[in-house]
Image (spheres, rainbow, N blue to C red):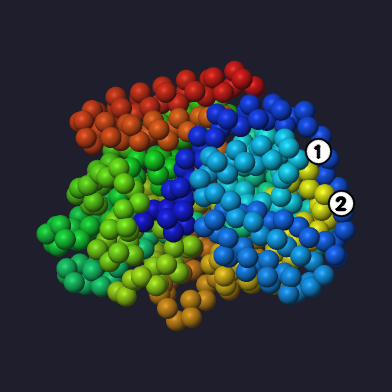
Amino acid sequence: MTSRTPRTRRKWVAALAVAAIIPMLAACAGNAKADGSAGTVDGSTIVLQTVNSLQPQFQKYADAYMKKYPKRKVEVRASTDDGAKYAQQLATARISGQLPDVFFNVDYLADTLAKANVPLDLASGIKDGKLGSLRIKDFAAPFVGQYRPISNPDEVTGLPVSADSVGLYWNKTLFDKYGVTEYPKADWTWDDMLRVAKEIQDKSGGKVYGLGSPLQDGSNQLVFGPVLRAFGADVYNGKTGKSDIGSPDAIKAWKLLISAYGTSSNPYSANANDPALAFSAGNVAMGIGSRAAIPGTQAALKDEWNVQSMPTINGKSTAGGGSYGLSISQTSKQQDAAWAFLKWFYSDAGMAVAQKVGGVIPPTNDGIDNGSWKDTGGKPPANIAIFGHSARTAVLLTQMPGSSGTVLTQATVKATQEVVLQHVSVEKAFQQAQDTVNAQLAKDFKKK
């Protein structure tokens, strides 16, 4: 269990492939007029578009808003969970002038959609009080930063719905069953985690996996990004415009991550979403997962379990993080009504609904520290507060220009497979991966 939302993030990795399509659409959209208008608030109807997997909770958000404001209507529309198709739909709708008023955005697509002129820049509206007393500085800066276009960092084209980050889930029942008394602690390192995971796996005779494989199939940037950073390497360096995933520091990270396969975790599997490998299945002693995975784990796992802060490397946090967000379309004819919905959603009342319905950690500094998300109603995990700390220290998913994000995913999967299945050296496999990514980055920068 390494995805930050239960089984949905994996579906969206493919969304990066749309980056090859969006620039062509953006070229057309760039010539389109940003002809949105204010409209009215009371008596208005706005369209809120989300993805199928999130439609039920977004409908509850809309219902709560309409109950509070009966003269305002919100029509929730659900679209595909296929990220590439979703982003292409939005870019095409921008050209045809049929964008929804408010729409689901996501961290690693935010820059791509901004280039296609889909979202409205919210920075000036927030400054002018469109969210009431809330200002950009009141939001957790790293998460808002994911919605700042790379080429226009003063803009904010979306607001995060949740300050989502990962922690270490652990199954006390399995620890006790196999006589392992060294429980996860806040001062654990990755060496500690892998050592104890191997102990459990060995003592169970392989019946239990000590740890859900951190890399999954090699694509899990939510985990490998922070680990590379802790060793001093970058998935992507915005200043140099290059990736150093094959550098000596990165090689140390890859060797550590790959060492888990078959010893501390399950063997390599190309099926990263195999339910049998999930922490909630009950045969995995430890797993890396987000706060959003708690409701599903509570429902599925009857064992005694808890969470702990992610282990460190060289004294540095390895908690990954990311978000999905809400944006207003540039062409909305009901922008004031859209702003009114966002004002309610990010208020204490709206965030109370989001915490109850969606299990979110509010993306504001006050919400992280004082939100009701910490209340589990007496159910596990008792140590839920660690997600507040990890939100503050998380290394967030890296925005990469053009189609380089797609190429990165493909390259790290290929390199992992070469090392694990074909016994290619880590150095050779990931140097080739780095060369492949940097070649694509050079092409993307040349297109600008």
Judge whether residue 168 can be spotted in this image.
Answer: yes
Determine whether, in the image, residue 425 is placed left or right of residue 34. Answer: left
Secondary structure state at the residue bearing disc 2:
loop
Q: Please tell me in which quadrant of the rendered image residue 431 appears.
A: top left
- Determine the CA span between mark 2 and mark 1: 12 Å
Q: Amino acid at mark 1?
A: Ala
* Residue at horizontal 40 percent and vertical 44 percent from the top: 220
Determine whether, in the image, residue 355 is placed left or right of residue 38. Answer: left
Q: Please tell me in which quadrant of the rendered image residue 58 appears.
A: bottom right
Considering only vertical position in the picture, is 421 above or below 442? Answer: below
* Residue at horizontal 63 percent and vertical 65 percent from the top: 59
- Which x, y percent locates residue 252? 32, 36
Marks 2 & 1, CB-CB < 8 Å contact: no
Considering only vertical position in the picture, is 14 above or below 238? Answer: below
Considering only vertical position in the picture, is 377 above or below 143? Answer: below
* Residue at horizontal 72 percent and vertical 32 percent from the top: 29
Which of the image's four quarters has the N terminus? bottom left
Residue at the far bottom in the pictured view:
378
Which of the image's four quarters has the C terminus? top right
Q: Please tell me in which quadrant of the rendered image residue 346 appears.
A: bottom right
Q: Amino acid at mark 2?
A: Ala
- On the image, numbered disc 1 is attached to which residue? 34
Considering only vertical position in the picture, is 51 above or below 116? Answer: below
Determine whether, in the image, residue 259 is placed left or right of residue 328. Answer: left
Label number found at residue 295: none
* Residue at horizontal 81 percent and vertical 34 percent from the top: 33
- Which x, y percent locates residue 24? 63, 26
- On the image, numbered disc 2 is attached to which residue? 38
Q: Residues within 10 Å of mark 2 (few under 14, many from 20)?
A: few
Secondary structure state at the residue bearing disc 1:
loop
